[in-house]
Amino acid sequence: MLTSYYLKIPRRIRILIIFFVIMLAAYFVARFLFAETRNVPDDFLKARQQASLVARDIVNISDDSTSKIDQIAKLDEERNYTGALVLVTEELQKNRTARGKAVELSNNLELMAENLSKISPISFGQKALEAVSSETTLISHLIAYNDYLNQLLDILRQKFSGRTQGDGIPDLVKKLNNEAKTINDLNQKFNDIMKEFDA
């Protein structure tokens, strides 16, 4: 019955229908088989691996620093300014190491960013961009952390020499702890996005 109905349709219309069916089939084949072909440049993958390792080092330094900041606050309360100054000086030295790591991280993030346009499909490129943005923000928080640490050292020195009461110390300790938490959270976000990227 369908055959007889089909034969009643003029030949030109039948050819047009066949043409549209072929075009529609070709569209779906292209859309579902070829569009999802994944391409991630090797340079992006290498930079991403290095960025993950460097960020982990930064987070470890930050975590270690957080416990030391609490010790510094305790020493300050006990009026052991010498001990507090020694710890802050040690933390600043570690923070110089973290700053060096931040430069290394930014170099890797730059390489990742340069390769974003070569990632396909576009949705994966957008995920990668989100991850790069997260780690870039981490660097700015590390800089803020370093600035607060320098301020803490300066206040402790002034307090030790009797030029100030050191009223800003609790506030700086709170800011340092907040920055350390933010650094951890941003790195976790980077890792979570990269897990989605790998899925």
Image (cartoon, rainbow, N blue to C red):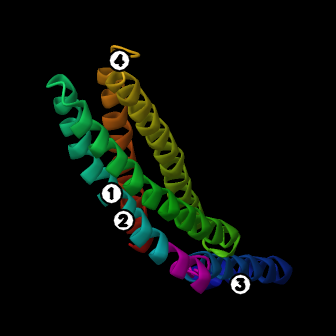
Give whichever of 3, 80 is nearer the camera: 80
Lower position in the chain sequence, tag 1 or tag 4: 1
Disc 2 packing (10 Å; few <14; some 14–19; many ≥20): some
| Foreground tag (1 vs 4) | 4
Residue 170 as seen in the image, left or right of residue 48: left
Categorize mark 3 by other alpha carbons within 10 Å: few (<14), some (14-19), many (20+): few
Q: Determine the CA span between mark 3 and mark 1.
A: 79 Å
Looking at the picture, which amino acid does disc 3 mark?
Leu
Location of mark 3 (residue): 7
Instruction: Say above or below: 120 vs 175.
Output: below
The residue lying toward the viewer, choosing from 10 and 177, is 177
Label 4 SS:
loop
Measure the C-alpha gap from mark 1 to mark 4: 31 Å
Q: Left or right of 167: which side holds 84? A: left
Residues in magenta? Answer: 35-48
The amino acid beneath tag 2 is Asp
Residue named by callout 1? 61
Q: Between marks 2 and 3, how big is the CA–CA gap?
A: 74 Å
